[in-house]
Image (cartoon, rainbow, N blue to C red):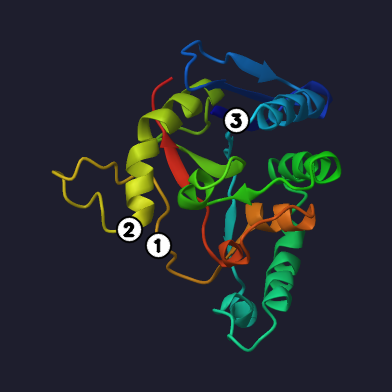
Amino acid sequence: MLVITMETGSLPGGRRRWAGRRHDDDRPDATSGVSSAELFDAVFHALHDGEQVALGFDCALTMPVPPDQGQASAPADPDADADADADALVTLAEPAASQPGLAELGDLLGELGTWRPWTTVSTSLARWKANTSILVWQAVPAPGAATVTPGAAADSFFRQLAAASRREADPTAGTDPTAGTDPAAGTEPAAEAVVNLAAAAARRAGLFVDPAELARPTVSITVTGG
């Protein structure tokens, strides 16, 4: 498993810092770079070698659906065109596609759409675990922190993976202090209609993503330490 996190803070020349590590390598920032080409190479070769890849971004990957567009995220009618519903959500997500972080995600998935079009993208831990592919997750700064450090994000992902999986399976898990879960980890139940910006980016790139994920929030993990 290769876990990579993107820092959306600008570097000279418009580059973005990214770093991560594998589950069996405890060296900080064992895999790192500052260019989109380096990021693509790291992800592509990991997938080619049969590894799962988890890509974390420290920007919002879910946005509320405007009130006047609420019907676009309503559960699909069994008799309706599911592809049309999914395309409507992708259209709603388009204005955010050029934002920092999302632009880099779109570029990476677009390259994979060209060179590895059979790649599956998930924003759900359960779906990701069922296939050897890519998970896109949101790295949330710890309370009081303004930024996310890629190395700390990878460490937090590994530490909280089990708790996040349990919380995704049961959103009420973690409310009991004896349950052993981290209430900061996992996907929170959506309180309003949302569009999943990461899933929309995958669909625009021509990669497979479960259409149901377009109307659900991405999995998120609060970054601690580092």
Is 1 situated left or right of 46 in this image? left
- Give how far apart the Cα atoms at labels 1 and 2 are: 7 Å
- Earlier-in-chain disc, 1 versus 3: 3
Q: Is residue 143 visible?
A: no
Q: Which amino acid type corresponds to the residue marked 2 in the rendered image? A: Pro
Secondary structure state at the residue bearing disc 1: loop
Report the residue marked by disc 3: 51
- Give how far apart the Cα atoms at labels 1 and 3 are: 29 Å
- In the picture as drawn, the residue positioned furthest to the bottom comes out as 79
> Looking at the image, how many numbered discs can be counted on the residues?
3
Q: Do callouts 1 and 2 mark residues in contact (Cβ within 8 Å)?
A: yes
Q: Is residue 198 above or below residue 91?
A: above
Give residue 8's quadrant in the image.
top right
Q: Where in the figure is residue 15, as x and y percent of width and height?
A: 78, 26
Q: Which amino acid type corresponds to the residue marked 1 in the rendered image? A: Pro
Report the residue marked by disc 1: 189
Report the residue marked by disc 2: 171
Q: Which residue is drawn at 70% across and 62% down?
A: 93
